[in-house]
Amino acid sequence: MMNQQWSQFYKDAGSKQVILFGMGKMCEWFLNYGTNVNIKALIDNSPSKVNRNIFSIYPNLKEQHVQDPIIHSFEDVTSSADTSQFILLITTRYDDEILKGIDIDSFYNVYSLPKMNNDLVTKREQYDKLPLVDKKVVVFADVYGEHGKAITQKLLQMDDTVDVVWIVNKRPSDCSRKVRLVYRYDFESYYYEISTAKIWIVDLSVDADIKKKSGQIYFQVKHWSSITLKKFSCEDMKWASMPGAVEFQKKEAARTDYILSGSQFDEDSCRRGFMYNGPFVRVGSPRSDIIFQPEIKNVVRNKLGISEYKKVLLYAPTFRVSKDESFAHQHTEQGIDFELLRDSLTNKFNGEWIILLRLHPSVASSADGIKLPDYVKNVSKYDDSQELVACCDALISDYSSIIFEAAYVYKPIFLFTPDLDEYLKHERQLLLDYRELPFPISVSNGELKRNIEAFDEVKYRKCVENLFNKYQVHEDGHASERAAEFILGLMNFKGKL
């Protein structure tokens, strides 16, 4: 075996398939967190596990990226495959015993999860002693987009000596060459970067076992804009009922130094949802700046292969939460009639319309199985949802807060909610009175047609203005600039927070 390091393992795993040996709790952990690895086979030497489906043993696995979920014996796999083309990852504390009984030279490489983790403990202790780099920023996010992307672009525009590192789950399709990408589960690189960065920009959360060092500054930027529709975190009773959720959020709030906000409403909801009592920096919504840039419209359309002469409707429904104890996100089709929708748009607004279907990122793969007409394009896996808002001429959603961003520039918005009563009663609690929003609500395709054809732009603009004035939301397209200025001001700050 060569050196037992996570960074080397992921370099190898980038070009080779992986066989996992040992279906215990370590394997469950790896299957949940060792994403972006192409797993060829699962093997175990216990007769009670061989021929079983891994999901029957661990039904709550988060990552289902296993080619074959059936557990095989070592002999079955090695006798029928050229093992020199595979990496063997031993995922059990009995690794030394297993290593004695196999021909390790017959594999491309052999790694031991316990040994890699032991090496990682040593490295983390070393990284904790390293000094901070004043001009290093680490961004934690699911995808290269959202507020982090807008702030990153503005930081590099204002000071190209800033070192920006993104911790990603997958390589983005469109990323500045000045941004360094680190795979989240390349643990050595991950821990090194976060241990030496002065600034953390986070839109979800940082792993609970990561300790913030003295002098590091933690920005929570959220993954919504200056106003959001649904209760979240500790105000969301379903989320708060999960074991350990509230305790985790208390620790997360304690290490947060600033939350970027866009309104008093935003700050009040964050204090409740995040259990946060610290300072806010009211800059607006950085990720929404792009919506104010008219030139982006055709840039995005070119990416999607859509003529600039066609009109675009973005249909962006959100997920539903499963009714079991897992509270998993799932897609539930609402039965929208795309043909009737297209005809209604043409009757009201003229022109030839293209419809973009954008499911929530957590259920994006569900769109792969939906049969769509040729005038509907599946963009559910498009990284940056704000680019899609920027390129559309109108938007339809249900309970997604993306509606507010299209409204910042007064794009027509319609709500299609056949499950309205069920959602409001059983699904998610809201922060706003849904029926008082300035967007027409439709519970059927016929009603959606009537609402589109009755759309009154003058009345609509006034209602939208009243909503934003009521909640003190005033976007102007310069939020990322204000955020970047504030962050740059802290980079050379040597005092105590």
Image (spheres, rainbow, N blue to C red):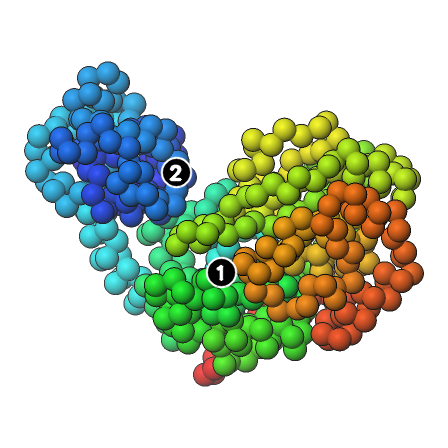
Judging from the image, what secondary structure is the residue with disc 1 in? loop
| Type of amino acid at the residue the image marks with label 1 | Leu
- Front residue (pair 238, 112): 238
Relative to 330, is 470 above or below?
A: below
Q: Where is residue 152 in the image (x, y as percent from the top left)?
A: 59, 58
Residue at which label 2 appears: 64
Residue at which label 1 appears: 204
Relative to 432, is 116 above or below?
A: above
Q: Where is residue 57 in the image (x, y as percent from the top left)?
A: 26, 40
Q: What residue is rendered at 74% in x and 36% in y?
A: 338
- Front residue (pair 54, 7): 54
Q: How many labels does the image show?
A: 2
Q: Is residue 51 left or right of residue 285?
A: left
Q: What residue is rendered at 20% in x and 52% in y?
A: 118
| Type of amino acid at the residue the image marks with label 2 | Gln
User: Few, some or many C-alpha atoms within 10 Å of disc 2 (few <14, some 14-19, many ≥20)?
Assistant: few
- Front residue (pair 310, 313): 313
User: Which circle, 2 or 1, is nearer the viewer?
Assistant: 2
Quarter of the picture containing the N terminus is top left
Q: In which quarter of the image is residue 286?
A: bottom right
Could you say which disc has been placed on residue 430 in the image? none
Q: What residue is rendered at 79% in x and 43% in y?
A: 446
Q: Where is residue 134 in the image (x, y as percent from the top left)?
A: 48, 68
Callouts 2 and 1 close, C-beta under 8 Å: no
Q: Where is residue 470 in the image (x, y as percent from the top left)?
A: 75, 75
Q: What residue is rendered at 49% in x and 60% in y?
A: 204
- Gap between marks 2 and 1, in whole Å? 22 Å
Q: Is residue 493 visible?
A: no
Relative to 380, is 374 above or below?
A: above
Judging from the image, what secondary structure is the residue with disc 2 in? loop
